[in-house]
Amino acid sequence: MRSVLSISLPEKTSSDLEKFARSTGRSKSDIVKESIHLYLWEAQFRKLQRRLSAKAKKRGMVSEEDVLKAVS
């Protein structure tokens, strides 16, 4: 099922979106859907990262290299 969302954008943002859509040959709707999807994914990732950061530090993992060594 799909739902319709109506939003108001500042004039500059609306103009930028319109120009970007034209230059990429995509619809404004597709660009906004992708943007929301990416925003939500990144928000979930940051939440998980914060939650696991404390556990990682307790195990002596303080850098990305430490994490990569542990999972490799």
Image: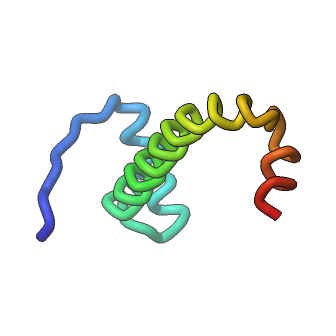
Would residue 62 appear left or right of 31 to someone viewing this image? right
**Looking at the image, residue 27 lies above or below residue 52:** below
Image spot of residue 57 (x, y percent): 73, 30
**Looking at the image, residue 63 lies above or below residue 39:** above
What quarter of the picture does the C terminus occupy?
bottom right
The image quarter in which residue 71 lies: bottom right
Query: What residue appears at the point 40 percent right and 55 percent down from the top-left corner?
Result: 37
Would residue 48 appear left or right of 56 to someone viewing this image? left
Query: What residue appears at the point 43 percent right and 68 percent down from the top-left corner?
Result: 26
Query: What residue appears at the point 47 percent right and 43 percent down from the top-left corner?
Result: 16
Q: Residue furthest front?
A: 59
Image spot of residue 35 (x, y percent): 44, 51
Please name whichever residue, 42 or 50, is drawn nearer the observer in this view of the structure.
50
Image spot of residue 28 (x, y percent): 36, 58
What quarter of the picture does the N terminus occupy?
bottom left
Would residue 21 appear left or right of 6 to someone viewing this image? right
Query: What residue appears at the point 21 percent right and 40 percent down from the top-left corner?
Result: 7
Would residue 60 appear left or right of 38 to someone viewing this image? right
Q: How many marks?
A: 0
Please name whichever residue, 42 or 61, is drawn nearer the observer in this view of the structure.
61
Please name whichever residue, 5 or 18, is drawn nearer the observer in this view of the structure.
5
What colour scheme was applied to this rendering of the protein? rainbow
**Looking at the image, residue 26 lies above or below residue 63:** below
Please name whichever residue, 37 or 31, is drawn nearer the observer in this view of the structure.
37
The image quarter in which residue 60 lies: top right
**Looking at the image, residue 15 lies above or below residue 53:** below
